[in-house]
Amino acid sequence: MLFQSSLRKELARSFGATLVVLITIILTIVLIRTLGLASKGQVNPQDVMLLMAYATIGRLPTILSLSLFIAILSTLSRLYRDSEMVVWFSSGRGLSSFVPPVLRFSWPVLLVIAVSALWLLPWTQEKTQELRSRYQQRSDLDRVAPGQFQESSDGSRVFFINRDSERKSGNDIFITTRVRDTRSVVTAQSGSIEQLPDGQVLKLEKGQRLEYQELSSDKAVTMRVSQFDVYGARISGAKPLNRDTTSFKLLSTWDLMQTPSRPNLGELAWRIGLTLSGINLVLLAVAMAHANPRAGRSGRLILAIFTFLVYSNLMTLSQNWVASGVMGFGPIMLALHGGFLAVALLWLTSRQHAWSLAGLWRQGVGRLRLGGGT
Protein backbone atom coordinates (compact mmCIF):
# COMPACT_ATOMS: atom_id res chain seq x y z
CA MET A 1 0.00 0.00 0.00
CA LEU A 2 2.83 2.36 0.89
CA PHE A 3 4.61 1.41 -2.31
CA GLN A 4 1.67 2.28 -4.55
CA SER A 5 0.59 5.45 -2.73
CA SER A 6 4.09 6.96 -2.67
CA LEU A 7 4.60 6.14 -6.33
CA ARG A 8 1.27 7.67 -7.38
CA LYS A 9 1.91 10.87 -5.42
CA GLU A 10 5.29 11.39 -7.03
CA LEU A 11 3.90 10.59 -10.47
CA ALA A 12 1.13 13.14 -9.96
CA ARG A 13 3.59 15.88 -8.98
CA SER A 14 5.88 15.15 -11.89
CA PHE A 15 3.01 14.89 -14.37
CA GLY A 16 1.48 18.19 -13.23
CA ALA A 17 4.77 20.08 -13.49
CA THR A 18 5.55 18.64 -16.93
CA LEU A 19 2.04 19.36 -18.20
CA VAL A 20 2.23 23.02 -17.12
CA VAL A 21 5.59 23.48 -18.86
CA LEU A 22 4.45 21.86 -22.11
CA ILE A 23 1.16 23.78 -22.22
CA THR A 24 3.06 27.04 -21.68
CA ILE A 25 5.41 26.22 -24.57
CA ILE A 26 2.54 25.19 -26.86
CA LEU A 27 0.52 28.31 -26.00
CA THR A 28 3.51 30.52 -26.80
CA ILE A 29 4.06 28.83 -30.17
CA VAL A 30 0.35 28.93 -31.03
CA LEU A 31 0.09 32.60 -30.00
CA ILE A 32 2.97 33.61 -32.28
CA ARG A 33 1.52 31.61 -35.19
CA THR A 34 -2.02 32.97 -34.69
CA LEU A 35 -0.82 36.57 -34.42
CA GLY A 36 1.08 36.06 -37.67
CA LEU A 37 -2.10 34.85 -39.39
CA ALA A 38 -4.03 37.79 -37.95
CA SER A 39 -1.44 40.27 -39.22
CA LYS A 40 -1.79 38.76 -42.72
CA GLY A 41 -5.57 39.15 -42.61
CA GLN A 42 -6.28 35.41 -42.64
CA VAL A 43 -8.04 35.32 -39.26
CA ASN A 44 -10.01 37.83 -37.23
CA PRO A 45 -7.82 39.52 -34.58
CA GLN A 46 -10.78 39.35 -32.19
CA ASP A 47 -10.77 35.54 -32.47
CA VAL A 48 -7.12 35.07 -31.51
CA MET A 49 -7.83 33.76 -28.00
CA LEU A 50 -10.56 31.45 -29.26
CA LEU A 51 -8.32 30.08 -31.99
CA MET A 52 -5.57 29.52 -29.42
CA ALA A 53 -7.98 27.55 -27.26
CA TYR A 54 -9.06 25.38 -30.18
CA ALA A 55 -5.45 24.79 -31.24
CA THR A 56 -4.42 23.79 -27.72
CA ILE A 57 -7.37 21.40 -27.34
CA GLY A 58 -6.51 19.87 -30.70
CA ARG A 59 -2.96 19.22 -29.51
CA LEU A 60 -4.12 17.85 -26.16
CA PRO A 61 -3.52 14.14 -27.01
CA THR A 62 0.09 14.86 -27.95
CA ILE A 63 0.67 17.07 -24.90
CA LEU A 64 -0.81 14.53 -22.49
CA SER A 65 1.09 11.60 -24.02
CA LEU A 66 4.42 13.40 -23.84
CA SER A 67 3.73 14.68 -20.30
CA LEU A 68 2.83 11.19 -19.10
CA PHE A 69 5.88 9.67 -20.79
CA ILE A 70 8.31 12.19 -19.28
CA ALA A 71 6.66 12.04 -15.84
CA ILE A 72 6.92 8.25 -15.57
CA LEU A 73 10.46 8.17 -16.94
CA SER A 74 11.74 10.98 -14.68
CA THR A 75 10.05 9.55 -11.56
CA LEU A 76 11.44 6.05 -11.97
CA SER A 77 14.85 7.40 -12.95
CA ARG A 78 14.94 9.42 -9.72
CA LEU A 79 14.21 6.26 -7.75
CA TYR A 80 17.24 4.67 -9.40
CA ARG A 81 19.39 7.74 -8.87
CA ASP A 82 18.56 8.03 -5.14
CA SER A 83 18.97 4.27 -4.60
CA GLU A 84 15.32 3.89 -3.62
CA MET A 85 14.86 1.32 -6.36
CA VAL A 86 17.44 -0.90 -4.63
CA VAL A 87 15.32 -0.87 -1.48
CA TRP A 88 12.20 -1.91 -3.40
CA PHE A 89 14.13 -4.64 -5.25
CA SER A 90 15.53 -5.93 -1.96
CA SER A 91 12.02 -6.18 -0.51
CA GLY A 92 10.97 -8.50 -3.32
CA ARG A 93 9.66 -5.92 -5.79
CA GLY A 94 10.73 -6.40 -9.38
CA LEU A 95 10.56 -3.91 -12.21
CA SER A 96 7.35 -5.51 -13.47
CA SER A 97 5.67 -4.72 -10.14
CA PHE A 98 5.81 -1.03 -11.12
CA VAL A 99 3.57 -1.61 -14.15
CA PRO A 100 0.21 -2.04 -12.29
CA PRO A 101 0.47 1.16 -10.17
CA VAL A 102 1.74 3.11 -13.17
CA LEU A 103 -1.20 1.90 -15.28
CA ARG A 104 -3.66 2.70 -12.47
CA PHE A 105 -2.30 6.23 -12.39
CA SER A 106 -2.24 6.53 -16.17
CA TRP A 107 -5.66 5.20 -17.19
CA PRO A 108 -7.59 8.48 -16.53
CA VAL A 109 -5.03 10.35 -18.64
CA LEU A 110 -5.22 7.69 -21.35
CA LEU A 111 -9.02 8.00 -21.31
CA VAL A 112 -8.75 11.76 -21.82
CA ILE A 113 -6.30 11.14 -24.67
CA ALA A 114 -8.77 8.76 -26.34
CA VAL A 115 -11.69 11.18 -25.99
CA SER A 116 -9.59 14.08 -27.26
CA ALA A 117 -8.25 12.15 -30.25
CA LEU A 118 -11.52 10.54 -31.31
CA TRP A 119 -13.96 13.37 -30.57
CA LEU A 120 -12.37 16.69 -29.60
CA LEU A 121 -9.80 16.72 -32.40
CA PRO A 122 -12.30 16.80 -35.32
CA TRP A 123 -14.51 19.20 -33.36
CA THR A 124 -11.68 21.73 -32.92
CA GLN A 125 -10.73 21.36 -36.59
CA GLU A 126 -14.31 22.11 -37.61
CA LYS A 127 -14.63 25.14 -35.33
CA THR A 128 -11.29 26.56 -36.46
CA GLN A 129 -12.21 26.16 -40.12
CA GLU A 130 -15.59 27.75 -39.45
CA LEU A 131 -14.02 30.83 -37.83
CA ARG A 132 -11.52 31.26 -40.65
CA SER A 133 -14.16 30.77 -43.36
CA ARG A 134 -16.54 33.23 -41.74
CA TYR A 135 -13.79 35.86 -41.58
CA GLN A 136 -12.72 35.27 -45.18
CA GLN A 137 -16.30 35.43 -46.45
CA ARG A 138 -17.32 38.63 -44.69
CA SER A 139 -18.74 41.56 -46.68
CA ASP A 140 -16.52 44.04 -48.53
CA LEU A 141 -17.27 46.84 -46.09
CA ASP A 142 -16.35 44.67 -43.14
CA ARG A 143 -12.98 44.06 -44.79
CA VAL A 144 -12.11 47.75 -44.84
CA ALA A 145 -9.66 48.81 -42.13
CA PRO A 146 -8.58 52.46 -41.60
CA GLY A 147 -5.19 53.26 -43.10
CA GLN A 148 -4.91 50.00 -45.06
CA PHE A 149 -5.49 49.01 -48.66
CA GLN A 150 -7.95 46.11 -48.62
CA GLU A 151 -9.10 43.94 -51.50
CA SER A 152 -12.74 42.94 -51.98
CA SER A 153 -13.90 39.35 -51.75
CA ASP A 154 -13.99 38.85 -55.54
CA GLY A 155 -10.71 40.71 -56.13
CA SER A 156 -12.27 43.35 -58.41
CA ARG A 157 -11.97 46.29 -55.98
CA VAL A 158 -9.41 47.82 -53.68
CA PHE A 159 -10.53 50.12 -50.85
CA PHE A 160 -8.68 52.66 -48.75
CA ILE A 161 -10.05 54.84 -45.93
CA ASN A 162 -7.74 57.23 -44.18
CA ARG A 163 -9.81 57.60 -41.02
CA ASP A 164 -12.88 55.80 -39.72
CA SER A 165 -14.55 57.95 -37.13
CA GLU A 166 -17.87 56.21 -36.50
CA ARG A 167 -17.40 52.83 -38.23
CA LYS A 168 -20.28 53.79 -40.58
CA SER A 169 -18.44 56.75 -42.12
CA GLY A 170 -14.93 57.74 -43.15
CA ASN A 171 -12.76 60.41 -44.76
CA ASP A 172 -10.28 60.46 -47.65
CA ILE A 173 -11.73 57.46 -49.46
CA PHE A 174 -10.05 55.73 -52.39
CA ILE A 175 -11.68 52.98 -54.47
CA THR A 176 -10.26 51.37 -57.59
CA THR A 177 -12.38 48.95 -59.61
CA ARG A 178 -11.49 46.67 -62.50
CA VAL A 179 -14.12 45.00 -64.68
CA ARG A 180 -12.63 43.17 -67.67
CA ASP A 181 -10.57 45.82 -69.55
CA THR A 182 -12.20 48.81 -67.85
CA ARG A 183 -10.67 50.37 -64.76
CA SER A 184 -12.08 53.18 -62.66
CA VAL A 185 -10.62 55.16 -59.77
CA VAL A 186 -12.89 56.99 -57.34
CA THR A 187 -11.70 59.43 -54.70
CA ALA A 188 -13.90 61.27 -52.25
CA GLN A 189 -13.51 63.50 -49.22
CA SER A 190 -16.01 61.58 -47.12
CA GLY A 191 -18.42 58.69 -47.30
CA SER A 192 -20.97 56.77 -45.29
CA ILE A 193 -22.82 53.47 -45.43
CA GLU A 194 -26.54 53.39 -46.12
CA GLN A 195 -28.68 50.31 -45.73
CA LEU A 196 -31.25 49.91 -48.52
CA PRO A 197 -33.88 47.17 -48.90
CA ASP A 198 -31.86 45.53 -51.68
CA GLY A 199 -28.44 45.81 -50.04
CA GLN A 200 -25.78 48.16 -48.73
CA VAL A 201 -24.66 51.26 -50.61
CA LEU A 202 -21.54 53.32 -49.99
CA LYS A 203 -22.52 56.97 -50.31
CA LEU A 204 -19.54 59.18 -51.32
CA GLU A 205 -19.53 62.98 -51.16
CA LYS A 206 -17.42 65.61 -52.98
CA GLY A 207 -15.11 63.54 -55.08
CA GLN A 208 -13.87 62.60 -58.52
CA ARG A 209 -14.22 59.54 -60.75
CA LEU A 210 -11.67 58.56 -63.40
CA GLU A 211 -12.58 55.81 -65.87
CA TYR A 212 -10.40 54.42 -68.67
CA GLN A 213 -9.91 51.28 -70.73
CA GLU A 214 -6.77 49.17 -70.87
CA LEU A 215 -6.13 48.77 -74.60
CA SER A 216 -3.21 47.51 -76.65
CA SER A 217 -0.21 49.73 -77.37
CA ASP A 218 -1.38 50.66 -80.91
CA LYS A 219 -4.71 52.06 -79.68
CA ALA A 220 -5.40 55.26 -77.84
CA VAL A 221 -6.58 55.12 -74.26
CA THR A 222 -9.93 56.74 -73.65
CA MET A 223 -10.45 58.46 -70.32
CA ARG A 224 -13.45 60.07 -68.70
CA VAL A 225 -13.12 62.30 -65.68
CA SER A 226 -16.19 63.42 -63.76
CA GLN A 227 -16.76 65.44 -60.61
CA PHE A 228 -19.59 64.60 -58.24
CA ASP A 229 -21.16 65.91 -55.08
CA VAL A 230 -22.88 62.62 -54.22
CA TYR A 231 -21.99 59.22 -55.65
CA GLY A 232 -23.38 55.80 -54.68
CA ALA A 233 -21.47 52.56 -55.03
CA ARG A 234 -23.15 49.25 -54.38
CA ILE A 235 -21.10 46.94 -52.19
CA SER A 236 -21.41 43.18 -52.14
CA GLY A 237 -22.64 41.67 -48.91
CA ALA A 238 -21.35 38.75 -46.95
CA LYS A 239 -21.22 35.45 -48.77
CA PRO A 240 -23.01 32.45 -47.31
CA LEU A 241 -20.79 30.37 -45.12
CA ASN A 242 -19.28 27.53 -47.10
CA ARG A 243 -18.47 24.67 -44.79
CA ASP A 244 -16.15 22.18 -46.39
CA THR A 245 -17.59 18.96 -45.03
CA THR A 246 -15.66 16.83 -47.52
CA SER A 247 -12.33 17.31 -45.74
CA PHE A 248 -11.43 14.15 -43.83
CA LYS A 249 -9.96 16.21 -40.98
CA LEU A 250 -13.39 17.72 -40.29
CA LEU A 251 -15.26 14.42 -40.29
CA SER A 252 -16.17 12.71 -37.04
CA THR A 253 -14.62 9.38 -36.19
CA TRP A 254 -17.92 7.60 -36.83
CA ASP A 255 -18.18 9.18 -40.29
CA LEU A 256 -14.63 8.07 -41.05
CA MET A 257 -15.56 4.49 -40.21
CA GLN A 258 -18.78 4.72 -42.22
CA THR A 259 -16.94 5.87 -45.38
CA PRO A 260 -13.65 3.94 -45.38
CA SER A 261 -11.87 5.69 -48.23
CA ARG A 262 -8.08 5.88 -48.25
CA PRO A 263 -7.82 9.45 -46.86
CA ASN A 264 -10.45 8.66 -44.23
CA LEU A 265 -8.65 5.50 -43.16
CA GLY A 266 -5.40 7.46 -42.95
CA GLU A 267 -7.02 10.01 -40.63
CA LEU A 268 -8.60 7.18 -38.62
CA ALA A 269 -5.19 5.53 -38.25
CA TRP A 270 -3.81 8.81 -36.88
CA ARG A 271 -6.61 9.27 -34.34
CA ILE A 272 -6.59 5.69 -33.08
CA GLY A 273 -2.79 5.76 -33.10
CA LEU A 274 -2.77 8.68 -30.66
CA THR A 275 -4.55 6.49 -28.11
CA LEU A 276 -2.44 3.39 -28.74
CA SER A 277 0.78 5.38 -28.63
CA GLY A 278 -0.13 6.66 -25.16
CA ILE A 279 -0.37 3.07 -23.86
CA ASN A 280 2.87 2.03 -25.53
CA LEU A 281 4.71 5.08 -24.21
CA VAL A 282 3.67 4.22 -20.65
CA LEU A 283 5.22 0.75 -20.98
CA LEU A 284 8.28 2.16 -22.74
CA ALA A 285 8.81 4.65 -19.92
CA VAL A 286 8.89 1.85 -17.33
CA ALA A 287 11.31 -0.16 -19.47
CA MET A 288 13.57 2.81 -20.24
CA ALA A 289 13.78 4.06 -16.65
CA HIS A 290 17.37 3.84 -15.44
CA ALA A 291 19.85 6.29 -14.05
CA ASN A 292 23.64 6.33 -13.97
CA PRO A 293 24.86 8.37 -10.97
CA ARG A 294 27.84 9.55 -13.00
CA ALA A 295 25.69 10.78 -15.87
CA GLY A 296 23.64 13.96 -15.97
CA ARG A 297 19.89 14.16 -15.67
CA SER A 298 19.41 15.44 -19.21
CA GLY A 299 20.43 12.19 -20.90
CA ARG A 300 17.18 10.36 -20.22
CA LEU A 301 15.11 13.44 -21.09
CA ILE A 302 16.83 13.76 -24.46
CA LEU A 303 16.29 10.03 -25.09
CA ALA A 304 12.61 10.37 -24.14
CA ILE A 305 12.03 13.30 -26.49
CA PHE A 306 13.90 11.52 -29.29
CA THR A 307 11.81 8.36 -28.79
CA PHE A 308 8.59 10.39 -28.80
CA LEU A 309 9.58 12.24 -31.97
CA VAL A 310 10.44 8.99 -33.76
CA TYR A 311 7.13 7.45 -32.75
CA SER A 312 5.17 10.57 -33.77
CA ASN A 313 6.91 10.79 -37.15
CA LEU A 314 6.26 7.12 -37.82
CA MET A 315 2.57 7.72 -37.07
CA THR A 316 2.52 10.58 -39.59
CA LEU A 317 4.29 8.39 -42.12
CA SER A 318 1.79 5.57 -41.54
CA GLN A 319 -1.09 7.99 -42.07
CA ASN A 320 0.37 9.04 -45.42
CA TRP A 321 0.97 5.42 -46.42
CA VAL A 322 -2.61 4.43 -45.66
CA ALA A 323 -3.97 7.51 -47.49
CA SER A 324 -1.82 6.79 -50.56
CA GLY A 325 -2.55 3.06 -50.57
CA VAL A 326 1.02 1.90 -49.88
CA MET A 327 -0.16 -0.22 -46.93
CA GLY A 328 -3.53 -1.20 -45.57
CA PHE A 329 -5.07 0.05 -42.35
CA GLY A 330 -4.77 -3.22 -40.45
CA PRO A 331 -1.18 -4.13 -41.40
CA ILE A 332 0.20 -0.65 -40.66
CA MET A 333 -1.51 -0.50 -37.26
CA LEU A 334 -0.24 -3.96 -36.36
CA ALA A 335 3.28 -3.27 -37.61
CA LEU A 336 3.69 0.15 -35.97
CA HIS A 337 1.83 -0.02 -32.67
CA GLY A 338 2.14 -3.78 -32.28
CA GLY A 339 5.85 -3.47 -32.96
CA PHE A 340 6.32 -0.77 -30.32
CA LEU A 341 4.28 -2.84 -27.85
CA ALA A 342 6.46 -5.87 -28.52
CA VAL A 343 9.63 -3.82 -28.06
CA ALA A 344 8.34 -2.37 -24.79
CA LEU A 345 7.36 -5.79 -23.39
CA LEU A 346 10.61 -7.42 -24.52
CA TRP A 347 12.66 -4.57 -23.05
CA LEU A 348 10.70 -4.76 -19.80
CA THR A 349 11.20 -8.54 -19.60
CA SER A 350 14.92 -8.25 -20.24
CA ARG A 351 15.23 -5.64 -17.49
CA GLN A 352 13.15 -7.80 -15.13
CA HIS A 353 15.39 -10.87 -15.60
CA ALA A 354 18.62 -8.87 -16.09
CA TRP A 355 19.19 -10.18 -19.58
CA SER A 356 22.08 -8.84 -21.62
CA LEU A 357 23.65 -9.66 -24.93
CA ALA A 358 26.96 -10.55 -23.28
CA GLY A 359 25.25 -12.84 -20.76
CA LEU A 360 23.19 -14.58 -23.42
CA TRP A 361 26.33 -15.04 -25.50
CA ARG A 362 28.24 -16.59 -22.61
CA GLN A 363 25.32 -18.91 -21.83
CA GLY A 364 25.14 -20.00 -25.44
CA VAL A 365 28.87 -20.64 -25.65
CA GLY A 366 28.78 -22.57 -22.38
CA ARG A 367 25.96 -24.81 -23.59
CA LEU A 368 27.83 -25.49 -26.83
CA ARG A 369 30.95 -26.49 -24.92
CA LEU A 370 28.98 -28.78 -22.62
CA GLY A 371 27.26 -30.37 -25.61
CA GLY A 372 30.60 -30.86 -27.37
CA GLY A 373 32.20 -32.42 -24.29
CA THR A 374 29.52 -35.03 -23.93
Image: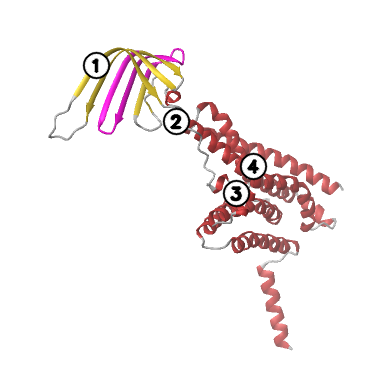
Spatial CA distance of label 4 from label 1 is 58 Å
Q: Is residue 273 magenta?
A: no
Spatial CA distance of label 2 from label 1 is 34 Å
In the picture, the disc for residue 226 is 1
Q: Is residue 187 magenta?
A: yes
Q: Which residue is mark 3?
A: 305
Q: Amino acid at mark 3?
A: Ile
Could you say where residue 248 lies in the image, as x and y percent from the top left?
55, 48
Relative to 164, 20 lies left or right:
right
Spatial CA distance of label 3 from label 4 is 25 Å
Residue name at image x 68 percent, y 48 percent: 114
Q: Are marks 4 and 1 in contact (CB under 8 Å)?
A: no
Q: Nearer the viewer, residue 320 or 104?
A: 320
Relative to 257, 170 lies left or right:
left
Q: Which residue is mark 2?
A: 41
Spatial CA distance of label 3 from label 1 is 69 Å
Q: Amino acid at mark 4?
A: Leu
Query: SS of the residue at dot 1?
Result: strand
Query: SS of the residue at dot 3?
Result: helix
> Residue 233 sits in which quadrant?
top left
Up-down: is 357 above or below 348? below
Is tag 2's residue or tag 4's residue first in the polypeptide sequence?
2
Magenta region: which residues? 161-189
Is tag 3's residue or tag 4's residue first in the polypeptide sequence?
4
Q: Which residue is mark 4?
A: 120
